[in-house]
Image (spheres, rainbow, N blue to C red):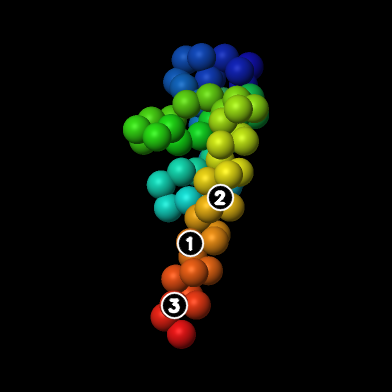
Amino acid sequence: MKHLNCALYGHHFVLTKHVTHHVKEYKCKNCRKQATTSSNGKIIQLSDKRKEINQTLERMYQIKKLKKVSLSN
Ligand SMILES: [Zn+2]
């Protein structure tokens, strides 16, 4: 019945991962479908390819953050 809810009312996405300031990963509370923010800000399905992209983004984001910290010191 929970899956029917998704079909009727849409997925109930909860945040699972903060990739960057703009990109986040989500999971549906009901059917466990995974989603992510696309480059134009829309919620799209999280494919394996997307996961890879997000991992790369996350690494770049962390490096950038570290650089900022070391510059300000
Ligand atoms: Zn769902």
Q: Residue 16 location, x and y as percent?
A: 59, 44
- Mark 3 in CB contact with mark 2 (< 8 angstroms): no
- The local secondary structure at tag 3 comes to helix
**Quick check: can you spot residue 55?**
yes
Q: CA distance from mark 1 to mark 3?
A: 11 Å
Most foreground residue, 42 or 13? 42
Q: CA distance from mark 3 to mark 2?
A: 20 Å
The residue under the point 61% across, 43% down is 55
> Residue furthest toward the bottom?
73
Image depth: mark 2 or mark 1 in front: 1
- The local secondary structure at tag 1 comes to helix
Image: 69 above or below 60 = below
How many tags in the picture? 3
Alpha-carbon neighbours of circle 1 within 10 Å: few (<14), some, or many (≥20)? few
Q: CA distance from mark 2 to mark 1?
A: 10 Å
Give the amino acid type for the residue marked by disc 1 in the picture. Lys
**Quick check: can you spot residue 30?**
no
Q: Earlier in the sequence, mark 2 or mark 1?
A: 2
Give the amino acid type for the residue marked by disc 3 in the picture. Leu
Give the amino acid type for the residue marked by disc 2 in the picture. Glu
> Residue furthest toward the left?
40
- Say which mark, if any, is on residue 71: 3
Most foreground residue, 59 or 38? 59
- Mark 1 in CB contact with mark 3 (< 8 angstroms): no
- Say which mark, if any, is on residue 58: 2
- Say which mark, if any, is on residue 47: none
Image: 31 above or below 25 = above
Q: Residue 61 location, x and y as percent?
A: 50, 55
Q: Which residue is mark 1?
A: 64
The residue under the point 45% across, 36% down is 37
The residue under the point 44% across, 71% down is 68
